[in-house]
Image (cartoon, helix red, strand yellow):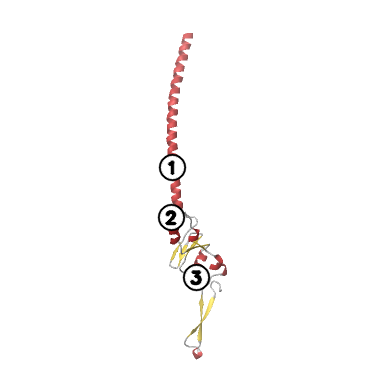
Amino acid sequence: PPHHGAATHVALPGPGTEGGGAAEAVAATRAPDPVHTVRALAPAHVADLVTGPVELVAAVRRLVRDMVVVATLEDAEDLVAAHPELTAVTAEGDLLSAHFAHGGSAGAPSLLEVQASVDEAAAELDALAVRCTELAEAQRLAAERRTASAALVEELGERRRAVERERS
């Protein structure tokens, strides 16, 4: 197969050629590199990767039936060029089909990841609220003990002074 940017020669009939011959035209074509051929990559169908609750899996698999996973955007381009009915999803999160392209990023969290983080933070806040309530109660009890202890210290001081007055 030709490499990226290789020229393809096409013979076209046209005027100015002797005996109704053909004029030669050169057209640049973009053919996939052998490394990026669809057959070599064996892309995985997204539907084959879906797991989950039985009642949802069939519906999700139907939604992603024409999607395949590929390694790179170049692989996605090659796949969609060869199979325009498919949508390619890259490891970076790019989506590419014959009529649609959406850039992705492996660093950007998905909606599910963001929701999981929000849920986790909410659970941590709930746990911290309980801990705050427990600590506030412990602080109140400690303050009561401190007040009682201070009163006892004062009372014992008064008794000591009274005993010292009796001795003198």
Please indicate whether residue 37 sits to the left or right of residue 98 in the image.
right
Residue 28 percent location from the top left of the image = 51, 75
CA gap between label 2 and label 3 equals 34 Å
Front residue of 91 and 159: 91
Q: Residues within 10 Å of mark 2 (few under 14, many from 20)?
A: few
In the image, what residue occupies the spot 45% across and 20% down? 152
Residue type of the residue flagged with mark 2: Glu
Q: Residue 82 — which label? A: 3
What residue sits right under mark 2 in the picture? 55
What residue sits right under mark 1 in the picture? 125
Helix or strand or loop: what does disc 2 sit on? helix
In the image, what residue occupies the spot 45% across and 57% down? 57
Residue 13 percent location from the top left of the image = 48, 85
Residue extending furthest toward the bottom: 19
Sequence-first disc among 3 and 1: 3
In the image, what residue occupies the spot 42% across and 26% down? 144
Q: Residue 104 — which label? A: none
CA gap between label 3 and label 1 equals 51 Å
